[in-house]
């Protein structure tokens, strides 16, 4: 009798199911050999599992054969094997402790390598995820940078008019408002609104401030520059476009990555007006600038990727600069050329900051 349509359907489904299972098993085997078996940690885990399973099977076979040979039940044979392992023997204490220490060290080494492997894979995965993130969408700015900066100053230093000095802790708290997000924008075409409205200036060195972080109660991070604040002066002028912030930082201890001698610091001050060092920060570990540039370093005799490290600048002597709007009158060749002498002389005690403020009034 020929099978009816339903029987043919059942055979067809069963055939497709078996083929599907077969393909899945082949794919699982290929994935296992390519992904897990070559890995030094996973191969040990799998090997330990195989040894455990095989050992259990062989033990069960031994117990079965023993029960048949001694003509006792499987349960009785099992209890005899258990009783055997419970027996005590006389072993030299030195041999016992050495064996225990070797076993402990082996287990520790295995677990340590296993945990490090998992952590490295998690970090690698997070770096990949971070790298494929969509670019941040910046809001549109509709104000001239001088107007934007004056508004931010008013929010951070409400009620102030003219110039006032601030202690480090107070300045850091106010800077949280002044440099709150967003600091980066997009501007409309044919508009005089700047996408980077807040800048810092020191002679011919200047750049936008689009990243800010508080490192401690008296220390901030502007971009890559670490600023341990010594004192801050804020000027909120009646002419909004002339508002500025004067920041004076004090020198910090070296990271210890380089052998910078006192004469090297003095030479830097004579040439540039200050001394600094550059280094990379990989998590909480400091690395040399060369290792940051190379994208790798050596940690515990192993090559470690440093592409996720942050570049930092630390000042080893006192340092100062002003903060103002990008389109302020201080963003000019006149300020670049003439302000540097004022800034350097203030650090060396040759003149006061008030002389710099009088100079800024001329703009």
Image: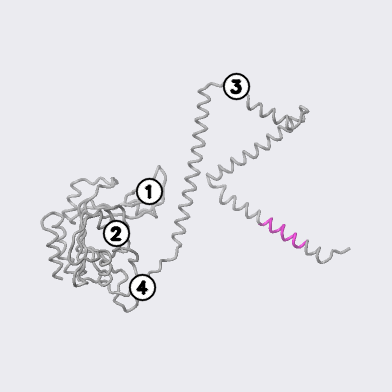
- Residue 17's spot in the image, x, y percent? 71, 59
- According to the image, label 3 marks what residue? 89
Q: Is residue 63 magenta?
A: no
Query: Could you tell me which secondary element the residue under label 1 belongs to?
Result: strand
Distance from label 3 to label 1 (Cα)?
A: 52 Å
- Residue 275's spot in the image, x, y percent? 21, 53
Circle nearer the N terminus (1, 2): 2
- Residue 168's spot in the image, x, y percent? 23, 55
Number of numbered discs: 4
Above or below residue 240? Residue 116 is above
Judge the density around disc 2: few (<14), some (14-19), many (≥20) Cα neighbours within 10 Å: some
Q: Nearer the viewer, mark 3 or mark 4?
A: 4
Query: Could you tell me which secondary element the residue under label 3 belongs to?
Result: loop
Q: Residue furthest right?
A: 1
- According to the image, label 2 marks what residue? 222
- According to the image, label 4 marks what residue? 140
Circle nearer the N terminus (3, 1): 3
Q: Nearer the viewer, residue 150 or 309?
A: 150
Query: Could you tell me which secondary element the residue under label 4 belongs to?
Result: loop
Circle nearer the N terminus (1, 4): 4
- According to the image, label 1 marks what residue? 297
Quadrant location of the N terminus?
bottom right
Magenta part of the chain? 11-23
User: Do the residues under discs 3 and 4 have CB atoms within 8 angstroms?
Assistant: no
Say which residue appears at 63% left-offset and 26% top-offset.
86
Distance from label 1 to label 4 (Cα)?
A: 40 Å
Left or right of 288 in this view: 317: left
Distance from label 3 to label 2 (Cα)?
A: 70 Å
């Amino acid at each position: 009798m020929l099978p009816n349509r339903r029987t043919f359907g059942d055979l067809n489904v069963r055939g497709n199911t078996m083929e599907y299972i077969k393909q899945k098993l082949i794919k699982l085997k290929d994935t296992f050999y390519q992904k897990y078996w070559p890995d030094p940690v996973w191969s040990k885990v799998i090997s330990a599992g195989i040894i455990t399973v095989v050992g259990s099977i062989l033990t069960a076979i031994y117990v079965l054969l023993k029960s048949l040979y001694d003509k006792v039940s499987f349960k009785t044979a099992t209890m005899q094997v258990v009783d055997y392992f419970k027996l005590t023997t006389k072993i030299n204490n030195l041999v016992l402790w050495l064996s225990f220490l070797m076993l402990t060290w082996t287990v520790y080494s295995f677990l340590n390598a296993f945990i490090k492997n998992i952590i490295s894979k998690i970090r690698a995965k997070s770096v990949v995820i971070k790298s494929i993130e969509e670019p941040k969408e910046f809001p549109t700015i509709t104000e001239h940078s001088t107007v934007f900066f004056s508004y931010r100053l008013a929010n951070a230093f409400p009620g102030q008019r003219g110039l006032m000095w601030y202690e480090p802790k107070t300045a850091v708290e106010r800077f949280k408002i002044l440099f709150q997000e967003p600091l980066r924008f997009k501007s409309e075409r044919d508009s005089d609104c700047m996408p980077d409205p807040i800048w810092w200036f020191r002679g011919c060195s200047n750049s936008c401030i689009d990243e800010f972080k508080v490192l401690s109660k008296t220390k901030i991070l502007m971009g890559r520059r670490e600023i341990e604040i010594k004192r801050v002066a804020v000027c909120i002028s009646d002419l909004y476009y002339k508002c500025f912030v004067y920041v004076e930082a004090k020198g910090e201890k070296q990271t210890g990555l380089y052998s910078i001698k006192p004469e090297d610091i003095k030479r830097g001050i004579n040439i540039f007006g200050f001394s600094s060092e550059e280094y990379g920060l990989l998590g909480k570990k400091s690395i040399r600038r060369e290792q940051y540039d190379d994208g790798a370093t050596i940690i515990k005799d192993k090559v470690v990727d440093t592409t996720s490290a942050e570049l930092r600048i630390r000042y080893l002597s006192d340092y100062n600069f002003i903060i103002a709007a990008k389109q302020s009158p201080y963003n000019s060749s006149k300020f670049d050329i003439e302000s540097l002498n004022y800034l350097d002389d203030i650090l060396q005690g040759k003149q006061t900051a008030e002389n710099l403020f009088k100079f800024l009034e001329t703009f």
